Image (spheres, rainbow, N blue to C red):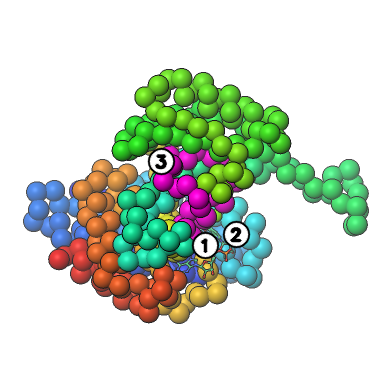
Amino acid sequence: HTFRIAAIPADGVGKEVVAAGRAVLDALAADSAGSPRPFAFSWEEFPWGCEYYERTGRMMDDDGLDRLREFDAIYFGAVGWPTVPDHVSLWGLRLRICQGFDQWANVRPVHFLPGVTSPLRKADDTDLDWVVVRENSEGEYAGLGGRNLAGRGPGGEVAVQTALFTEVGCERIMRFAFDLARTRARRKVSSVTKSNAQQYGMVLWDDVFRRVAADYPDVETESVLVDAMSAKFVLRPEELSVVVASNLHADILSDLGSALAGSLGLAASANLNPERRHPSMFEPVHGSAPDIAGRGLANPVGAVGSAALMLDHLGLPDQAARLRRAIETTTAAGVRTRDVGGTASTEDVTKALVEALNA
Ligand code: NAI
Ligand code: MG
């Protein structure tokens, strides 16, 4: 079978880590030739991003979603560059794809790797892992609001940014989290809330959580305020399995989770349209990292882990597991980029990953 994948490296280190991920995926595919289940990837690369914006005035083509629609999956790098305002680049490309394709579930595993020292000082607890499930279609990033309300001019300007919570939106992400919990060794869902201070949307969130939880009596639950959850990530992470949170809360907590695992450069994510009516998108959690871009310093592990999530989605879980083992072999062997205490380049790590796959 040949899978059609749209690659959108976009900006900064996005280009370096997408190239790394493609090389590793192509190595896996090459190795499958002659196996009982051979597969291949047919790639099309799209040049969208901030440079494209500076040339054309658009982050992506107007018919971009229509062109992406026919692919089996989208493999994304990172968007954003100092020459373009971040809200323009993010909304013009990444959020347009997430919302256009109703990728309402964002899955972000927090995974501790051998050979990588965690600031938690639990570096040997490589069995410590949990998954942040992020509501990816509404909440605080619904894009509702406006500036200069009431016509007040400079100095007195008023801006409103409204969070949108729908019962349908809350319910589907919570069912997704509970279903995921049932596939894990520890069947537990922790809901992240702030309903003590935000008395409408977050109270609806809590109500739906309780209602959905009743359908999953075999799954342990807890509801934790987001501030307390930040502390829990650091102090008692072994109590976590699936963490379900709103768009903003999960955005922040997943960066915290990846930092606790050792680096933002390690963290993988999947933006899923679980109904499979539209393509899903796989990308590292990190951004375009202008501070290190173009110098071979980017850690490709987050992007390669995202490729493993893509393999799961494409129905190749054995290949995904093989890729994850290759990541562990590589970090354990000390082939690590600077962000995780090593001296290897992006390319060195990519080569080591390919060798580990073939070993
Ligand atoms: P960032 O994630 O790009 O960088 C934060 C820190 O982590 C930097 O010190 C960077 O060097 C480091 N880092 C990130 N990825 C790394 C990797 N693969 N290997 C080693 N170190 C890595 O976040 P920042 O600096 O806040 O944002 C930079 C740009 O990225 C902005 O334009 C922002 O809007 C955009 N952004 C895009 C995202 C996306 O496309 N999904 C997500 C987050 C930010
Ligand atoms: Mg983020």
Amino acid carrying mark 1 in the image: Gly
Would you name the residue on which mark 1 appears? Answer: 287
Pointer 2 or 3: first along the chain: 2
Left or right of residue 38: residue 124: right
Indicate the amino acid at tag 2. Answer: Ser
Residue 220 x/y as whole percent: 42, 29
The answer to whether mark 2 is within 8 Å of ligand 1 is yes
| Residue labelled with disc 2 | 89
Residue 237 location, x and y as percent? 45, 48
- x 57%, y 59%: residue: 59
Q: For the residue carrying disc 2, how many other residues have a C-alpha within 10 Å: few (<14), some (14-19), or many (20+)?
A: many
Q: Nearer the viewer, mark 1 or mark 2?
A: 1
Q: Is residue 256 magenta?
A: yes
- Of labels 1 and 3, earlier in sequence is 3
Task: State the residue at coordinates (15%, 52%).
Answer: 38
Disc 2/disc 3 C-alpha distance (Å): 33 Å
**Is the residue at mark 1 in contact range of ligand 1, meaning its CB lies under 8 Å from it?**
yes
Name the residue: 12% across, 57% down. 33
Extent of the magenta region: 234-260
State yes or no: residue 200 in magenta: no
Say if residue 242 shows up in the picture: yes
Residue 336, compared with residue 201, is above or below; it is: below
210 to 309, vertically: above or below = above
Secondary structure of the residue carrying numbered label 1:
loop
